[in-house]
Image (spheres, rainbow, N blue to C red):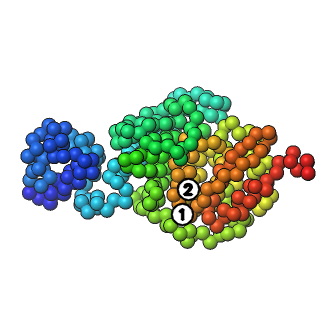
Amino acid sequence: MNERQLNFGAKIRFFRKTQNISQEQLAKIVGVSCGYISNLENGKINPTLSTITKLSTAVGAPISALTNNDNLSNLKNLKFSPKFEILFEEIRSVGKFAKESFVKNDIIYFKEKTNKSDIVTDIDLILENRLIRIIRKHFPELIIKSEESYNEKLLHVSNTSNIAIIDPLDGTANFFANIPYFCISLFIDSEKDGKCGVIYDPITDVLLIGNPKKIEIRQNGEEYIIYANDVSCKKNFINDVTCAIISDYNTPSTVTEPFIEYLYSEGIKRVVSLWSPSHDYMNLMMNKYDCIISFSKPNFSEAAGLFFVEISKNNSLNIVSKDLLNKRYYLSISTRNSYTKSIVNLVKNYKTSCEKNKL
């Protein structure tokens, strides 16, 4: 018996109990005796590679997590459950494929959806299929709604449960044009495992993850906690604000462009519209943006981002209704707390040129 065997056995026991599997059940799945599992967990057996592979599948843990040098105390100190930690790594793996495809310009197929700007590529579909398989493996009870395969409108996201909402490539138009501003976005609401948001940027390896108790940013092996108090926010003047505008493909430029001009005229420092809502919300969480104003209805690209705003103590979400060019829009305004009042009032006071002419 050696320390490596003891460490491996302890990990098997840890992941087995996490999955609520008994020794008898694990033995049956792997095809060994119950005594073998007992000896394995007590560090008395050195399993073959074939057995390790079967054990990895049975307890829902990657082989690397079972065989690396990390000790059991590191696993017990995980900030998220092992199931979610495994999910994060598998999303990173999917993102690696997206990055490689982007660098190689691997797109073979694309088609228009609602118009020439709204497209789907073969890479979208490959990423979507991989993400769906991953979610079904770890969360078989969830109803999966993914942008490319779910044909209905996404409504009332906050009132759903046992659901996974995926945007496999948020920023497809950017990806297609070889602009490195796109993300993988996932929101999970499980009655069994709780809520979790994931936004991953494959280009910079920035992973934004969170649940109602904590939000983290991970990059290149480093972890950064997003603190409960907005201590990093020292700016509080409107002319310091960087604002992102989100609009779907059905929102005409005759609505958004005058609004952007209005924001500049009122002193907003910088307004961006970069066609990847998930990335915009990531930048808000990282304090790179100060507010996001969205003209879109609830959609796949914003499900995870809005969840982060909801659970963050640094940010606020407000809804303002505006009648613009004979259509009612419900603008969602996500802001850092110090700007909430001024930005919301700014949006409420906005009047189109037609409204001004009537005065």
Residue 61, horizontal then vertical, whole percent: 28, 47
Q: Is residue 292 left or right of residue 218?
A: right
Which structural element holds mark 2? Answer: helix
Other residues around mark 1 within 10 Å, as few (<14) / some (14–19) / many (≥20): some
Number of callouts: 2
Q: Is residue 328 left or right of residue 137?
A: right
- Choose between 101 and 114: the one closer to the eye: 114
Under mark 2, the amino acid is Val
Going 18% across and 42% down the picture, which residue do you hit? 26
Residue 300, horizontal then vertical, whole percent: 55, 41
Under mark 1, the amino acid is Lys
Q: Is residue 221 above or below residue 323?
A: below
Residue pointed to by mark 2: 309
Going 53% across and 69% down the picture, which residue do you hit? 229
Quarter where residue 232 is shown: bottom right
Residue pointed to by mark 1: 313
Q: How far apart, in angstroms, are the residues tagged by discs 2 and 1?
A: 8 Å
- Choose between 261 and 95: the one closer to the eye: 261
Quadrant location of the N terminus in the rendered image: bottom left
- The label shown at residue 146 is none
